[in-house]
Amino acid sequence: MNKHTIPESESRFFLAPISVEKRGEGDAKNPSVIEGTAALFNKRTKIGGWFYEEILPGAFDDVLSDDVRCLLNHNPNHILGRTASGTLEIWVDDAGLKYRYTTPNRSYALDLEDAIIAGDVSESSFQFKVKEVIWIEQDDDLDIRQIKKFDKLYDVAPVTFPAYQDTSVAKRSFDLQKENQNSIKTRKTVREAQLIINNNKFKHEEV
């Protein structure tokens, strides 16, 4: 687990453009605005070799009013903005979850802006907790987990390395789903066997 991961949370990374809008070249009174996409709807991604995952449109509807931070690499010591203070905006469009903040006058934020302009940082991530999922079982491929609703949105983050580093919670979700599937299959097999026994007994009594 990453040392900055919130317990029982998950994080996902997406390769999507991060833009820098210069308000005034070299003017400290007009800092730049950074805008990125933290999540994409309907983009199928393989999680840990266990299953595919998709985020459904509307999944963020219940968490857009959460007190969300924007953190560099999910590091709480490198805060870039916060919705509660009005220094961070988050919203959804047809593509996914968007975020925007004005570069604060902090050394790491200024360095990040330079790295984004240079193309050294081009991915974003978000940290979350799931509320409702839909599982689609596939016989010839990995199962699909569709996230229908998020329970909590903790932060959005420009990140250096796009990697699915925090998958322990996702793995537990997958294992639980498999246990449920196996339990359903077992009960179905027992019912089918009982039906066969009952039919054979009925035929025997008829004879």
Image (tube, grey):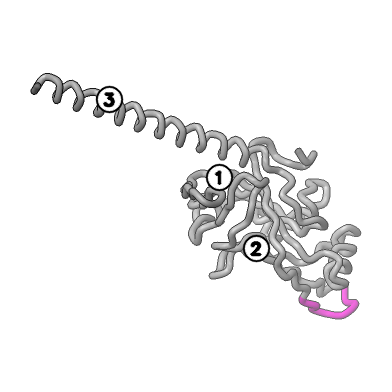
The percent coordinates of residue 116 (x first, y second) are: 83, 68
The prevailing secondary structure element of the residues shown in magenta is loop
Q: Which residues are magenta?
A: 21-28
Q: Are marks 1 and 2 in contact (CB under 8 Å)?
A: no
Q: How far separated are the C-alphas under marks 1 and 2? A: 21 Å
The stretch drawn in magenta includes residue 27: yes
Residue 116 to residue 79: above or below: below
The percent coordinates of residue 70 (x first, y second) are: 72, 55
- At a point 77% along the width and 76% down the height, the residue shown is 21
Q: How packed is label 1: few (under 14 Cα within 10 Å), some, or many (20 or more)?
A: some
Name the residue that disc number 3 marks. Answer: 194
Q: How packed is label 3: few (under 14 Cα within 10 Å), some, or many (20 or more)?
A: few
Residue 172 to residue 33: above or below: above
What numbered label is drawn on residue 149? Answer: none
What amino acid is labelled 2 in the image?
Answer: Glu
Q: Is residue 191 left or right of residue 128?
A: left
Q: Is residue 130 left or right of residue 26?
A: left
- At a point 62% along the width and 44% down the height, the residue shown is 50
What numbered label is drawn on residue 130? Answer: 1
Of badges 1 and 2, nearer the viewer stands 1
The stretch drawn in magenta includes residue 188: no
Q: How far separated are the C-alphas under marks 1 and 3? A: 39 Å
Name the residue that disc number 2 marks. Answer: 89
Which image quarter: residue 189? top left
Q: Is residue 184 left or right of residue 12?
A: left
Earlier sequence position, callout 1 versus callout 2: 2
Of badges 1 and 3, nearer the viewer stands 3
The percent coordinates of residue 55 (x first, y second) are: 55, 56
Q: How packed is label 2: few (under 14 Cα within 10 Å), some, or many (20 or more)?
A: some
Closest to the observer, 27 or 185:
185
- As drawn, which residue projects farthest toward the left? 206
